Amino acid sequence: LASYGQAAGQRRFVEEAERQFLVHARYLADPASGLWFHGWTFAGRHNFARALWARGNAWITVGILELVEFAEIPPSVRAYLLGVLETQINALLKAQAGSGAWHTLLDDPTSYEEISATAGFGYGLMKAARLGIGSTECRAAGLRALEVVVANIDDKGVVANVSYGTRMGADLQFYRDIPIHPTGYGQALAILCLTEGARHLQSKVEAA
């Protein structure tokens, strides 16, 4: 939406994208953990199972970085969103598993490690490092995620260990039970991670 508005010179679309991010932050960002809940209902005014679902968080990491890089947004909105993002990044660095991946429930190490979210976080952390956003640990954590993503791509290019489509769940067990299945979004997030990783590795070669 913001990209189209920027390219077409239609400011109202960029402003709507800004509004969407601010509304999402208002209802989904968890100040206690720094992470984001999966959803919100105005009917019951609650966050369903209060799931800190990995792929939903990955879309936020990716989306905020895309918005601030490609759209002209007011400095106040930019500062607010980057502050929210840095809070999330700090929480993600703590939640990264020893393998370099993230669990499908970010605060539950008994839930399975999920590769589409890991790819999204890897992309986001490496990109944040490139743009000078977040702590100095971002690049190293992103490169660790990149290694995990590469290890989960088979000879045909299919990304493994991706959770299937996930609606809002009534309890946390719902998320633990989501089946693993190759998906288009798993492929797309892996491509983002690989392309950003290539930029970092190329810059390392050029610096050497």
Image: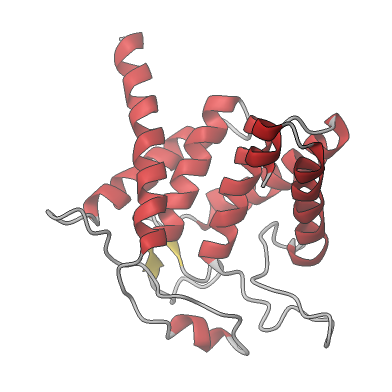
Residue 185 in percent (x, y) is at 42, 60
**Residue found at x 82% / y 43%:** 12
Give the camera-side residue of 95 and 22.
22
Q: Is residue 26 visible?
A: yes
Q: Residue at x 40, y 75 (%)?
A: 164
Quadrant containing the C terminus is top left
One can see residue 31 in this view? no
Q: Residue furthest right?
A: 76
Q: Residue at x 50, y 77 (%)?
A: 166
Q: Position of residue 22 (x, y in %)?
A: 81, 53
- Name which quarter of the figure residue 196 lies in: top left
Q: Give how far across and how far down residue 8 sits, in percent.
A: 68, 34
Q: Is residue 163 left or right of residue 150?
A: right
Left or right placement of residue 10 versus residue 177 in this view: right
Q: For this view, does 65 lie left or right of residue 19?
A: left
| 131 left or right of 68 in image | left
User: Which of the pair 85/64 is nearer the observer?
Assistant: 64
Q: Quadrant of residue 57?
A: bottom right
Q: What residue lies at 42% left-to-right and 52% top-to-bottom?
A: 189
Please tell me in which quadrant of the rendered image residue 180 appears: bottom left
